[in-house]
Image: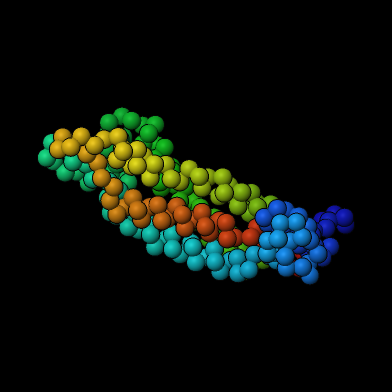
Amino acid sequence: MSPNYKTAASLKLTLCLHCHKLNPESWTICSRCGGGISQRKPKSVQIALAWLITAIIFYIPANIFPVMTTYAFGREVASTIIGGIFELWEQESYLIAGIIFVASIIIPILKILILLWLCISLKYKLNDTLRLRTALYRLTLWIGRWSMIDVFVVAILVALLQLGGLLSIQPTVGSLAFAFVVIATMFAAEAFDPRLIWDNLED
């Protein structure tokens, strides 16, 4: 580590996360925007873990229960996420099936596993993967916006395909549970303070 390595904390400064102004560490209110400040997000890991547990709980019904029900010519068909992916694959819509599989299955699981590892690594002070963990945290923030694709697809279909008794689509409990999964993982990523990763190195 370079001898010139310094952080705001080592210089007794605190970064305001609202307007990004550096303030003396003894201050609790930002001198520029008036927002509350602290050296690190209070109870960051605990809050992130709480949101992750919430996401894991809702992920089970999100995949078990149907995300939408289709009414076509008096016939009712309920579709789960996995069932919809298989149906699209059988219809040779490989690209759409692949996109929904990645957005609805891979991305939520990946975000949960990465954030869990970040929280656990802080407990055991794994100083040999600092840059990797920082990059993975940035990845979770970037891919989070794509997690709602499945919910958007259902919303668009519900809005467009309403033909009375001939054809209609209604969202079901699965889509609501999946939306909660996405929201919970987004809140978990926002609650986690990545600066804690580098605090271990200073210690």
The quadrant the N terminus occupies is: bottom right
Would residue 103 appear left or right of 142 to someone viewing this image?
A: left
Q: Residue at x 43, y 45 (%)?
A: 148
**x and y percent of residue 41 in the render?**
64, 64
List the single residue furthest toward the top: 92
State whether residue 181 is above or below residue 162.
Answer: below
* Number of marks in picture: 0
Please tell me which residue lies in front, 191 or 87.
191
Quarter occupied by residue 39: bottom right
**x and y percent of residue 116 in the render?**
53, 61
State whether residue 10 is above or below residue 89.
Answer: below
Q: Residue at x 78, y 57 (%)?
A: 22
**x and y percent of residue 107 in the render?**
47, 47
User: Quick check: can you spot residue 125?
Assistant: yes
Please tell me which residue lies in front, 59 or 203.
59
Please tell me which residue lies in front, 187 or 33.
33
State whether residue 137 is above or below residue 39.
Answer: above
List the single residue furthest toward the right: 3
Would residue 60 appear left or right of 48 to someone viewing this image?
A: left
Q: Residue at x 24, y 37 (%)?
A: 162
Quarter occupied by residue 152: top left
Q: Residue at x 31, y 52 (%)?
A: 174
The quadrant the C terminus occupies is: bottom right
**x and y percent of residue 13 in the render?**
80, 62
Tell me the colour scheme of the image: rainbow
User: Quick check: can you spot residue 128?
Assistant: no
Would residue 183 appear left or right of 66 to someone viewing this image?
A: right
